[in-house]
Amino acid sequence: MSRHWNVVNDCFEISEMPFYWRLSQSTESAADISSTLPIRMIADSVFDYLKFEPSEEEWSNIDKAYQQNENIGFVNPNSGQLQTYGSSVNNFFLASLQKFTPGTIYEIGCGAGFSIKFLKENGWNVVGIDPSEYSLKWSRELGFSLINQFFTEELLDRPADLIYCNDVFEHVPQVEQFSKTVYDSLEDGGVFCFATTNSTQSIAIGDISMLEHQHVNMFTEKSIHLILRQAGFSDINIQGGSYGNTFHVTAQKKKSGRQTPLPETDISCEGYFERASERVEAFGRFYDETEDLQCYVPLRSIPYLATVGDFGNCPVYDSNEAWRGKYIDGYRSPIRSPKDLEFSDGTKFFVGSLTFFSEIKNMLVELGVQRDAIRSIRELK
């Protein structure tokens, strides 16, 4: 095994990792977009979260990916996620609208507009804000109102009653300033409502499966509280989503609002890089000693495979049938489904997802895999 990662001065870096931004029918790279990029992660000591700081060249690739019509981050009817993750966030947004009964509503980063369509079907009118050609195409197809620009404080004609976003908070650099801009764009009493990734469990154990080039921020509940409080929000409420490992967050702009106490938890980024080093070294040993290794959940397994320089040797599986047979840029093996499962007595499985580990393990056991042949990063020593 050759080592492709390093920790120096509280910075975890993988020298080369597949750039997971789309699914395609072949291993052919997209024009002008690198199929692999370095990735490095540092800790924000003020707000206690992890963040990825791309170089100018890396940002250029990420920006180009956002401008394409194939971005994997956008939930749409072809993504295979509308009835799972999409349903969870839609029901959260609907419940929030029913609770706060806003008049003017905007969605930042609306993508294909699946939430706007759902809320319209339930009696709510939402205007989307998204600069992408992708969103412009879907707004014309579904007929929703779109401001086809980047979100800024000057963008809205008048303050909003409610602003919401899904899968945006983890993508935004300078997320503290973004939160302040949302705050300044709301009426007094207005509500900021969003869904974002929950990295608490991974930060606690030193897991690197959350690394993804477009996800520049990785939060705990405490860090979200600190960021929103700094922006001026009060009455902050953070709950877990009903699907996957996500946060569902509401916060209000109130002159006399209640300052929500910080969550009582000792989980923070302190010591994360030491923990991550131990986990990655444990994966490296497991990789070296396993002749037939197969991985489940590509998105979460690929960061670990990149640390040992594996860009397509291990078969990768996912339960989303819409992804079957497709390729991730920078990884030479296609995504397989459980229908394609082939294994022998010596096969071992690495499940990259901590959230769905038990569910996937039980499914593999039902298909005949030995229980002790299935591992997550938590079990590796």
Image (cartoon, grey):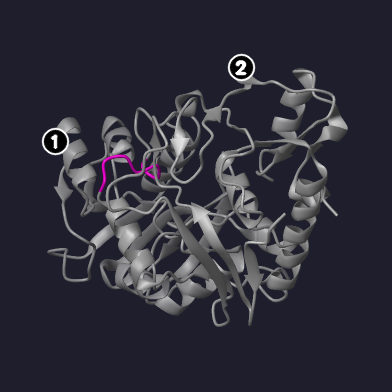
Q: Which residue is mark 1?
A: 140
Note whether residue 259 is visible.
no
The reply to whether discs 2 and 1 touch (Cβ–Cβ < 8 Å) is: no
Spot occupied by residue 297 in the image (x, y as percentages of width and height): 60, 38
Could you classify mark 2 by the number of other residues whose Cα lies within 10 Å: few (under 14), some (14-19), or many (20 or more)? Answer: few
Q: Left or right: 105 with respect to 359?
A: left
Q: Secondary structure at mark 1?
A: helix
Q: What amino acid is labelled 1 in the image?
A: Arg
Task: Tell me where the magenta segment starts and ends, as one range.
Answer: 68-74
Q: What amino acid is labelled 2 in the image?
A: Lys
Spot occupied by residue 97 in the image (x, y as percentages of width and height): 36, 46
Task: Tell me: residue 163, above or below residue 5.
Answer: above
* Residue 44 position by quadrant: bottom right
Q: Upstream in the sequence, badge 2 or badge 1? A: 1
Residue at 21 percent across and 37 percent down: it is 138
Task: Tell me: residue 204, above or below residue 341.
Answer: below
The image quadrant where one finds the C terminus is bottom right
Q: Does the magenta segment cover residue 76?
A: no
Task: Tell me: residue 44, above or below residue 70.
Answer: below
Q: Which disc is residue 117 wearing?
A: none
Residue at 62 percent across and 62 percent down: it is 4
Q: Which residue is mark 2?
A: 339
Could you classify mark 1 by the number of other residues whose Cα lies within 10 Å: few (under 14), some (14-19), or many (20 or more)? Answer: few
